[in-house]
Structure formats: structure tokens, C-alpha cells
Image (cartoon, rainbow, N blue to C red):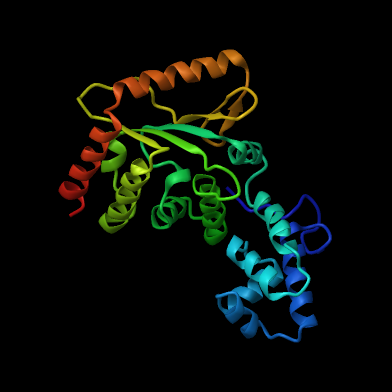
Amino acid sequence: MTVELSPDDATDPGLSPLRNFGNEVMLERMRMNMSRVELGRAVACGESLVAKIERGDRVPQREFAEGCDRVFPYANGRFVRLWRLVIRYAYPPWFRPYVALEEKATMVRMFNPQLIPGLVQTPDYARAILRTGRPDNLDELLTARLERQRILVREDKPPANLRLVLNEAVLRNVVGDPAIMRGQLAHLRDLGEVPRNRVQIIPDRGRHHGYQCPFGLLSFSEGADVAHVDGFPRGYVLAEPDDVSAAQGAYDLLTAMAASPDESAELIGVILKGCYP
């Protein structure tokens, strides 16, 4: 996943969402005769980060945009609105349609045989995963990935319900180090304790169930479900009824093979204590 500024000249604030955001921050800061140090203090970040955002070298977090809306008079939510466009361009073109659908979903069903999905990764786990690709924009990729997780805790509308099925091997595949795994498994167990969520683990009984590819389903308050298949070099969305029906059937089989949510929480706890004490 790479940060795409725009299809045109990214140095022009009128064409690049990221440059435009930074340019607006700089103009408002200068209008108020504020230094970057002063703005950083007001929005709880460092001077160097303010400078990088103003130059369009760093994708800002939502909290930075919210801070600008508080600090700059008459902003009226402008910086959060600009930020939404910035974060959209932080995803590659092929992934943007899925993210837009995910934001509207009332239920997200996911299966992964090897890794914790990005939607429920802790920052440390996500950073360790992203680092393996040796990107030169790691912080931007991490910001974009973690931003997707807001759908699980959003307050402006009901949070999306999570349905997650994982192979037991996912809990044992060490990403980063034991400390990272402890945090990730604890987070996974906490997610499963939220009443609207279901986290289920398929115990390793020595027999493979046959599903090797990560995939998921999105459901909406209106309209048909869609399926998403993760893969290399890119994933893809399936909307054809036959494809979606096949994905629904496969997911139902996986949930039937998995332990119950309560049994799965116990298994997570056992692995936490036994593998990452």
C-alpha cells in the first residue's frame, strides 16, 4: 500500500489532497501569527510533525485535523473534511472502493488463516507487519490502516458488528516479538468480549479445513452483501450474487468448524499464558 498524492503534480496545493491540507494548515497558522511550536502544543504534537504535515510529507492523523478545527477560528470542521480526502488517497486506487464500502458496513465478517486482519491489529502488530515490506512511508501506511478501525467504535452512527474467524495458527505465528503478540492477543480477546462482536478460533486438530485465502463479507442496512478476497499483489471486491453466496457458504462452514466465542476466548487465554508469558 502506497500513499498516492494525486494523479497530477503533487507539488501543487490545488491538485494534491495532502499538499492542500498542509497548505491550509500553514495559511491558518500564519494568519494567526502562530509558530509551528505553538501549533504543535495546541494540537498535542511536535514542531517537526507540524512541519512535515505542512509540506505534505506526512499523512496527519484525524486528531490533528480535529485539533486544527479547535484552534483555528471559523474552521467549522473544514480540516476534518479535508482530512477525509487526504486519508482516502492514503490507500492505493484498487483498495479505495473496499474502504468506502467498509465505512458503510453494519457488519464485517472476516476470515484469515495466517495473520490478524488489519481491521483489528494493534499499532505495534500492524507496524511489524508493514515493516516486512520495507516501505519508505511506514508511518503513513500505519496511519491509514489504523484509521479503518474507527468503524468498530464510531459514535456518529452505530458501530459495525464484527465477526472474525481465525486459525489457531494465527495466534501462534509470532509477529514482531512476544510483547507485541501479548498485546495483540489481549486486544483480540477484548474485542470478543464486546457483545456485538464474535471472535472464533478454529482449533488445530491436525487436519486442514481447505481454506487458504483470507476473505470477508460486508453487510449493509440497505443493499446486498459484498465479498472481499485478499491476495497478492492486490485484493478485489466481488458483488455478483453467485460469488457472494459462495463466500457466505464458505464462511458459514468455517464458523461451524470453529470453537464457540467463549471457548475461543479461553483458547486465546491459554495461548497467551503458554506462548507469551
Residue 151: quarter of image: top right
Task: Between residue 204 and residue 185, name the one nearer to us.
Answer: 185
Number of dots carrying numbers? 0
Q: Is residue 163 above or below residue 175?
A: above
Q: Is residue 42 above or below residue 267?
A: below
Q: Residue at position x 45%, y 16% from top?
A: 249
Q: Residue furthest left?
A: 274
Q: Residue at position x 62%, y 36% from top?
A: 101
Q: Is residue 58 left or right of residue 110?
A: right
Q: How far across and how far down the image is residue 126, in percent? A: 44, 52
Q: How far across and how far down the image is residue 244, in percent? A: 55, 19
Q: Residue at position x 50%, y 15% from top?
A: 246
Residue 193: quarter of image: top left
Q: Is residue 27 above or below residue 14?
A: below
In the rendered image, which quarter contains the C terminus?
bottom left
Q: How far across and how far down the image is residue 137, in percent? A: 56, 59
Q: Is residue 245 left or right of residue 197?
A: right
Q: How far across and how far down the image is residue 234, in percent? A: 57, 36
Work out whether residue 269 can be spotted.
yes
Work out whether residue 209 can be spotted.
no
Task: Between residue 206 and residue 110, name the one nearer to us.
Answer: 110
